[in-house]
Amino acid sequence: MAGRLDGKVAVVTGGASGIGKACALRFAHEGADIVVADLDEERAHETVAEVKAAGRGSFFVRTDTSKHEDCEELAARVYSAYGRANALVAAAGISHALYVSGKEAAGPVSPEREASFIINKPIEYWEKVLAVNLTGVMYTNRAFARRMVEHAQGGSIVNIASGAAKIPIPGAADYCVSKAGVWMLTKTLALELAPRGVRVNAIGPGFIETPMTATARADEARGQQILSGIPMGRFGRPEDIANTALFLASDEASYFTGEILFPDGGLFTG
Ligand code: NAP
């Protein structure tokens, strides 16, 4: 049976873990070759191995998405290997300045959240979150959008924002602002690129079972409290987001641009 991304090349930042990894594997099962960009070499190589086991080509490029040179190098490596990128999923992100995926995994709202209020938060924490979550997304979008336009092959960019793009969370202003910024970046870039055949959309996940939410889910009282606010009564799975990204990356979404979809089980409906 034909895959929905047969013959395509997709680049996934944050592809070593959680949502990015789920996107990499889902896209591979639909026929795409996958370039994994991440900081975490060990887990990125696991994603590459799983993509290859699914019968698709894959390689890893160590990339700090908050560094412009890294993003340019990533794009150069992809175009040197394939001569194109049909899709980019920008999933690399952090929930707060001290977050290290798979190690220190506290959610954006910590029990000590007053220490994270704007009036108390160290300036460098704010700068770090904005650098990774917003400027890093712009760097990757820019590096690939320029080449997609130059090569006149079209393309689809999918940015992983958050429900926090529309709902303020006390103690997580840096995260919320970064994700609201990704939403606006998505809309602006979509208008700039629409006449050039490149679509740009975003996803605003709800509360998803990944390392980013592991600490909150491990705390039973906190986990139950979050669960009780989700109308569908379950946390999201990384595959829920990968399915949404697959739709946006595929030709089925060929008339979508500048849009954000919120797979959140109703959490942020209002
Ligand atoms: P995750 O499992 O921690 O994955 C994030 C990945 O991004 C990790 O592999 C991490 O690498 C990588 N990364 C972090 N900083 C990077 C940088 N500067 N350059 C390159 N890679 C970097 O978390 P996740 O839940 O899948 O998060 C993926 C995206 O979804 C994030 O943008 C997050 O904000 C968003 N999101 C998540 C949820 C949720 O409930 N989980 C909800 C809404 C939005 P290291 O392991 O080396 O740090």
Image: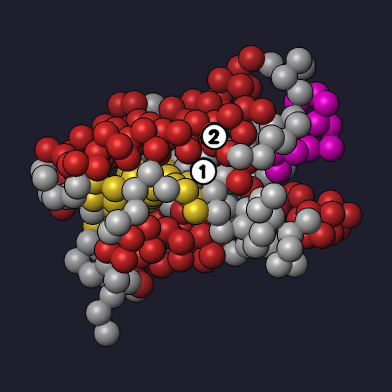
Q: Position of residue 32 (x, y in %)?
A: 27, 64
Q: Amino acid at mark 2?
A: Ala
Report if residue 41 is visible in the image: no
* Between 18 and 90, the one nearer to me in the picture: 90
Mark 1 sits on what residue? 161
- Secondary structure category for the residue under label 2: helix
Q: Residue at x 30, y 37 (%)?
A: 191
Label disc, if present, on residue 227 of the rendered structure: none
Q: Between residues 207 and 105, which one lies in front from this camera angle?
A: 207
What residue is drawn where x is 46% and y is 61%? 244
**Is 113 placed above or below 217 here?**
above
- Membership of 232 in magenta stretch: no
| Residue 43: percent from left, percent from top | 48, 53
Q: What crowding class fits label 2: few (fewer than 14 Cα within 10 Å), some (14-19), or many (20 or more)?
A: many
Instruction: Provide the residue span drawn in magenta.
Output: 107-116
Q: What residue do we see at 25% from left, 79% from top? A: 2
Q: Residue furthest bottom?
A: 1
Q: Is residue 110 magenta?
A: yes
In the figure, 35 relative to 182: above or below? below
Q: Is residue 236 left or right of residue 247?
A: right
The residue to which callout 2 is attached is 180
Write the residue at 12% across / 38% down.
Answer: 150
On screen, 236 above or below 146?
below
Tell me if residue 9 comes above or below residue 252 in the rendering.
above
Q: Quadrant of residue 126?
A: top right
Kind of residue at badge 1: Ala
Residue 165 pos. (x, y %):
58, 39
Look at the image and tell me in which quarter the N terminus lies.
bottom left
Q: Are marks 2 and 1 in contact (CB under 8 Å)?
A: yes
Residue 187 seen in the current view: yes
